[in-house]
Amino acid sequence: MKQERNKTDNQSSLDFLTREKFYSDHILNSSRSMISVINRDYVYVKVNKTFCNAQRGMAGSIIGKSLGDVWGEETFIKNIKHNVDKCFAGATIKYEASFITPQAGKRFFEVIFRPFPVDSGKITHLLAETFDITDLKLTEKVAIEKEEEFRKFETNLPIGFLRCKPDGSIIHGNKAFLQIMDCTSENSLFSANLRDYYAEKGIFDLHVEQLTDSKPKSFGRVPLKTCSGKEIVCRISGFMSLDETGDPSYIDFAFEDSTRELMLENRLLEAQKLETIGALAGGIAHDFNNILATISGYAELLIDDLPCPSLSSEKVAKIQMAVNKARSLTNQILTFSRQVEQQKVPVSVYEVLRETIGFVKSAAPPTVTIKSTCRDKKKYVFADPTQLFRVFLNLMTNAIQALEDKKGSISVTLTIEEGKKVRGDLNNVIVADEYVLVTFRDTGKGMDPSLLRRIFEPFFTSREVGKGSGLGLSVVHGIVSEMDGAILVSSEKGKGSIFYIYLPVYVEETGQTVFKGIKKKLLFITGNRHESKILSLALESAGFEMIHSSEISHFNKILADPQSRPDIIIYMSDSEQIRIDDMANSFQKNGVSPPCIIITDSNQDMTGENLVNLGIISQHLVKPVSLKEIESAIQLSIKR
């Protein structure tokens, strides 16, 4: 009976163990995780069905194999062995790794190694549980990529994004906001309050009040102060988020820097205003010139009827001088209004600039230092050289006046800029692939914004009454505009001004015709060296054969030789070596009377000169003169 009972008990135990093994195997094989048991020899002694499916094998084909056989020796040594050894030392190990599986290729896993001790406490096996987290990893990767994409979008977009508390305390600002507000780092924002960046007090609180309905709002252009103290204008939009109780949580703002946009709008308005003023002034100048022509004509008739010299002839001469001054002013107005056609030829900007700097240096006070940097000396523009000289001379003269007899400097630079690069600065249709950029920088008194807006208006001047006509910069604007160029200016009170002259680089085109003078021989009697050089350059570019003379002996030699005798003479009245009396004597001695064009200052009286009395002058031009005026005078003189 006892044997029967023992046999029954053994069978029950065996059945229990069988059931337990069935249940444990069923649980292991039903698990979605890869479960295995590994001995101290790094050999698999048990694996579940999930493990076998991942390895595309049966349990019998895996049990008895080492970890190196299953996962590859290199992977085992680099990624698995040190973790297994830690587990056999008694630690539970958890880590993430990627492995190549036969069924699905590269997969990501979370691996847990647990020590599997026996009754003696010695660790002979470990339980490895491996979870496939590939889908989770891919989801995390997509989330990270989306987050990075949004971060780049937020960072690279030229719109400043800022989050702050309702009281204005700044929580976060993107890179664009830092750049707009001229801040060095985001950390500098955390100690700041947004209301401190508003130029006008109370505007921020008004914006917060308008955002309490939790609807997006656009506040238009708002003046702000940057971290460096500079005032800018930004277009601001905002949205307030509420918490669960309905109380304000935080506010998101978007900032678009409208400073440049506003500047371009103001520049457009200024251009339209100048165009209107120019049209009005030009019409008046034309009518006034007709009146001056009448006055001048009758004055010349009076001179012929009056004995010379006499008190009456001197009075008429004064009238003629006044007419010349008035004509000079009206010509400047017409230049500003772009109603005077320029005679343009290809001209080297460097040559004109060099002569201008030399002319100014010779007359500048010793307290003024003039520096120049010319990086490209071979570029040409299509211009009237005399008018270009006038532009540079006016700007440098203004710079000297801005120094107010104080010690200072004028810096002149010549560079070449690509048309695409200056498109934003010029804000108009680009007419050339390259532009010559001439910059005039002075360390003078500078100008405030109210003055800066009016500097190109005719007759506007900041100088004392009687010390300026107010036409210098307006004439410069007209000449540069006529050349399809642009003039920009920046200035700061007490620190000086910078004028930027953009001129399109000349490119010779097939079929393009440039004015060529009738191939005549011109004798040019020079006056001021630099001014004469520009006039000579203009005439040579126009195609005339030039002969220069500055001494009376050389002049006499030219007139005595029929082969070298000129067709026309251009005489600068400020010539120091050849006087008008000497010219008249030479004409009588050699029995010649070539037509003569004389160029004088507007305040110079020529009525008492022998050359005038002898009737040798064919044309009288008053400075400043243009190539167009000289060309017209030459053609009229030749026709006589």
Image (cartoon, grey):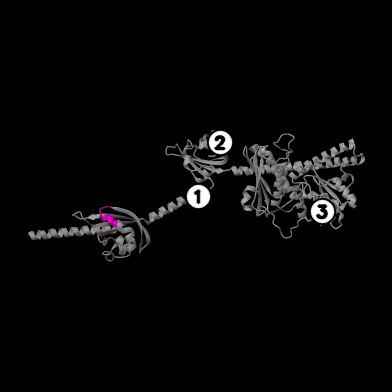
Q: Residue at x 73, y 36 (%)?
A: 467
Q: Which corner quadrant of the image does residue 434 belong to?
A: bottom right
Q: Considering the numbered disc 3 on the image, is that residue within a helix, a strand or a loop? A: strand
For label 2, the crowd category at 10 Å Cα-Cα, with few meaning under 14, some 14 to 19 and many 20 or more, is some
In the image, residue 516 above or below residue 448: below
> What is the CA distance from the residue labelled 2 to the residue labelled 1?
29 Å
Residue receiving disc 1: 153
Foreground: 532 or 474?
532
> What is the CA distance from the residue labelled 2 to the residue labelled 3?
65 Å
The disc label shown at residue 199, or none: 2
Image coordinates of residue 537 in percent, x first then y, are 75, 52
**Principal secondary structure, stretch drawn in magenta:** helix
Nearest to viewer (mark 1 / mark 3): 3
**Which of disc 3 and disc 1 is earlier in sequence?**
1
Residue receiving disc 3: 522
Q: Considering the numbered disc 1 on the image, is that residue within a helix, a strand or a loop? A: helix
Nearest to viewer (mark 2 / mark 3): 3
Foreground: 133 or 158?
158
Q: Which residues are magenta?
A: 83-91
